[in-house]
Image (spheres, grey):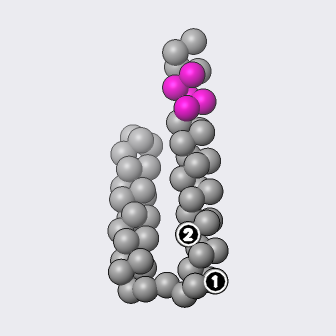
Amino acid sequence: MAKSRQHQEAHGIGQIAEQLEQQAEAAEQIQGGSEADRRVIAASREQDSETEDGFEA
């Protein structure tokens, strides 16, 4: 039961992260982005891919 709940929570967190990324992209399209924003997003994506690689072992 705990594993199912943890899976649901992880899935929910993933959905939230995806929604926030979409909102950030939409805001950038509307307002234009800054170099600092682009660096933060790139670093975040790099960290996400490293984290995902660790789980696929």
Q: Considering depth in this image, is 3 or 25 the residue closer to the camera? A: 25
- For badge 2, the amino acid type reads Ala
Q: Residue at x 54, y 42 (%)?
A: 13
* Contact flag, marks 2 and 1 (Cβ < 8 Å): no
Query: Which secondary structure, mark 2?
Result: helix
Q: Residue at x 53, y 36 (%)?
A: 10
Find the residue positioned furthest to the top. Answer: 1
- Residue 25 visible in image: yes
Q: Residue at x 41, y 77 (%)?
A: 37
Residue on which disc 2 sits: 24
Residue on which disc 1 sits: 30
Q: Considering depth in this image, is 13 or 32 the residue closer to the camera? A: 32
Residue 1, by quadrant, is top right
- Residue 45 location, x and y as percent? 43, 64
- Residue 18 location, x and y as percent? 59, 56
Query: Which secondary structure, mark 1?
Result: helix
